[in-house]
Image (cartoon, rainbow, N blue to C red):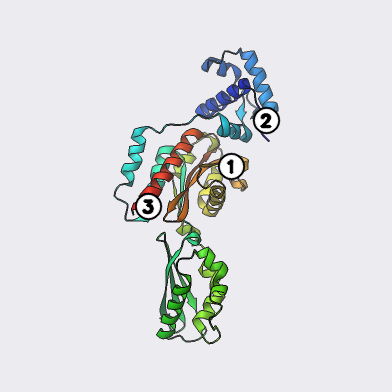
Amino acid sequence: MLHQLSDREKNVLRYVIQQFILTAAPVGSRNITKKYDLGYSPATVRNIMADLEDLGYINHPHTSAGRVPTDSGYRFYVDGLMDSFEIPSQEKEKINSALQGTLSDTDTLLSVVGKILSDITDQLACVIYPRFDAGKMVKIQLIKLSSNRLLVIITVESGLIKKITLEIDSEISEEQIILAESLINEKLAGLTLSEIRKTFKERLSDTPVGDKPIMRLFFDSVDNLFTDVKTSDKVILAGAKNLLKKPEFENAEHFQGVVELIENKDIIIHIIEKSSEKLQEKVFVSIGAENPSPELSHFSIVAKEYMKDSTPGTLGVIGPRRMEYEKMVAIVDFVSTILSEYLKKG
């Protein structure tokens, strides 16, 4: 629970956090009074810092006389103390220039966005493809591979394609395939994959399944067919080296945490997608222990949705809790907006 703070307390907390973000070293009262013109004596600042520690906004590392922000301190800062950040015009131009010439290729565009986001923020950038099961189905194609094997190709509005091979326990003819493909497209085109998965049996309930092996197969395979693509096909990570050079991750345990994070993309996807659902049109910030996975307790995430047609994807950055939040929020917001605009043109 966040407490009400006096203006004095807010000022001291702001400068403790800003100084710690800058130096990665615990911050003392004398350091604050020398660097910032607060108009308070070191003793006054020391007393205020003691109060902020009692409230849980900063804490006292064992080996230092200075204080460092807690997750609660960072949260208070992000929600009410940080200033807005104006992205320099040359960085905006750098982003625009990088995206030029990639309009016809969504894969290339998203890869470029990941790289430019990691370069500008100096964090680990993450770009998650538009959610396959949130996309509207454009068409389904059925291709006979053998007498009892069928390739199903599902195309959604965002341009993503899913291919899956199904085994049938009886022989199928070309005529059966054409009829089934036509029927499924007629009944389901224009619906999201999520809607299809939930209502498939209801929408095709008037189809006699018993003597139609393909339709029987579809009835049995709904959950497998109309669900999301596998993790490795839907996420781009860029800038892992940026994390590894941060002082927070110099010790072996935290270094290993970065390696595990990069290797286990499921963790990142789950948390970023869940996070962005809460604030769909705003930048979402999740700090340290606020992340539902213990693997991310040393990290902060700044993320926002972008749109490809009517289908949302998510992009963001992952870094240490000691990050320049105002800069990260501004850049993620800008890149999300401009990516959505470029995807409209493609």
Query: Is 134 located above or below residue 338 in the figure?
Result: below
Farthest residue to the left: give it: 101
Give the mark, 2 or 1, whose residue is nearer the N terminus.
Answer: 2
Q: Where residue 199 appears, x then y in whole percent?
A: 56, 69
Task: Say what amino acid the circle numbered 1 marks.
Answer: Glu
Q: Where residue 61 appears, x then y in whole percent?
A: 64, 28
User: Which residue bears the numbered disc 2?
Assistant: 3
User: Which residue bears the numbered disc 3?
Assistant: 343
Q: What whole-number distance in Å separates the C-alpha atoms at marks 3 and 1?
A: 40 Å
Is label 2 in a helix, a strand or a loop? loop
Count neighbours of disc 1 (C-alpha within 10 A) and say few if under 14, some if 14 to 19, many if 20 or more: few
Count neighbours of disc 3 (C-alpha within 10 A) and say few if under 14, some if 14 to 19, many if 20 or more: many
Q: In the shown orientation, is residue 133 left or right of residue 107?
A: right
Is label 1 in a helix, a strand or a loop? helix
Task: Say what amino acid the circle numbered 3 marks.
Answer: Leu
Instruction: State the quadrant of the N terminus.
Output: top right
Q: What whole-number distance in Å separates the C-alpha atoms at marks 2 and 3?
A: 43 Å
Farthest residue to the right: give it: 54
| In-front residue for pair 6/68 | 6
Is label 3 in a helix, a strand or a loop? helix
Q: Where residue 142 appears, x then y in whole percent?
A: 42, 76
Residue 324 in view: no
* Tags 2 and 1 touching, CB below 8 Å: no
Name the residue located 32 percent from the left edge and 55 percent from the top edge.
Answer: 104
User: Which residue bears the numbered disc 1?
Assistant: 253
Query: Is 243 located above or below residue 88 in the figure?
Result: below
| In-front residue for pair 190/133 | 190
